[in-house]
Amino acid sequence: MKMKNIGLLNNLQYSFATVLWSIMISDKRVTIKEQKKFNTFLKNEFSLNPSEIEAMFEKVQENTQESINENLELLKDALNDHPIQKTRFMKYLNECIICDGVDEREYHTFEEIRAKLF
């Protein structure tokens, strides 16, 4: 089931985008492949159109670590009753890491996210 079909998760689009952004920026650069993964996630899971995705991308670039942590807390609570969606999201984060070559900084961020969500 797509996240848009679960009301609570659909309301947390920004939180998902923020956490995805935190993985992408871990190595201090955002590649075209990562950008495509970001776009695809928001399109597939929430049915956002290209202009909505672009606006979301611009908004998440302003996030601080404090904001990322706050959004992780929101996701932890929301995903608690949705283990399949939580696992799919973690899988997607992993795919984002490997799409342009593995960087240890990205896996460090992934492990921090995993520890906070599980």
Image: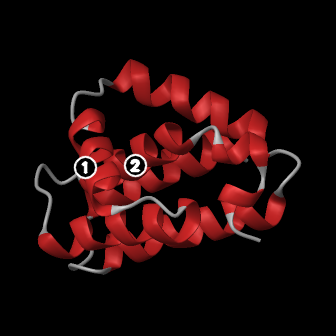
Nearest to N terminus: mark 2 or mark 1: 1
Is 92 on the left or on the right of 39, as rendered? Answer: right
Question: In this figure, which colouring scheme has been used for the structure?
Answer: secondary structure
Mark 2–mark 1 CB contact (< 8 Å) = yes
Q: Secondary structure at mark 1?
A: loop
Which of the two residues, 64 or 42, is positioned nearer the viewer here? Answer: 42
Residue 52: where, in percent of width, then height?
Answer: 34, 50
Task: Name the residue rendered at 24%, 51% in the picture.
Answer: 54
Of residue 18 and residue 106, the one placed in the foreground of this image is: 18
Q: Residue at 57%, 35% (x, y): give it.
A: 72
Query: Residue 71 vs residue 73: left or right?
Result: left
Can residue 116 be seen at all in this image of the molecule? yes
**Crowd tier of the residue under label 2, counting other residues whose Cα lies within 10 Å: few below 14, some 14–19, many 20 or above:** some
For the residue pair 106 and 87, the one nearer the viewer reads as 87
Q: What type is the residue that disc 2 sits on?
A: Thr
Q: Nearer the viewer, residue 117 or 89?
A: 89
Three-letter code, disc 1: Ser
Q: Which residue is mark 1?
A: 26
Q: Which mark is residue 109?
A: 2
Instruction: Say which element carries label 2.
Output: helix
Give the Cα separation between the discs numbered 2 and 1. Answer: 7 Å
Question: Which residue sits at x=53%, y=30%?
Answer: 71
Please provide percent x and percent y for residue 2: 69, 68
Q: Is residue 109 left or right of residue 3?
A: left
Looking at the rendered structure, which numbered label has been put on residue 87? none
Indicate the quadrant where residue 67 lies. Answer: top left
Q: In the shown orientation, is residue 71 left or right of residue 60?
A: right
Crowdedness near tag 1: few (<14), some (14–19) or many (≥20) residues, C-alpha within 10 Å = some
- Say which quadrant the N terminus sits in: bottom right
Residue 62 in the image: state x and y as whole percent: 22, 28
> Is residue 86 among the parts visible in the rendering?
no
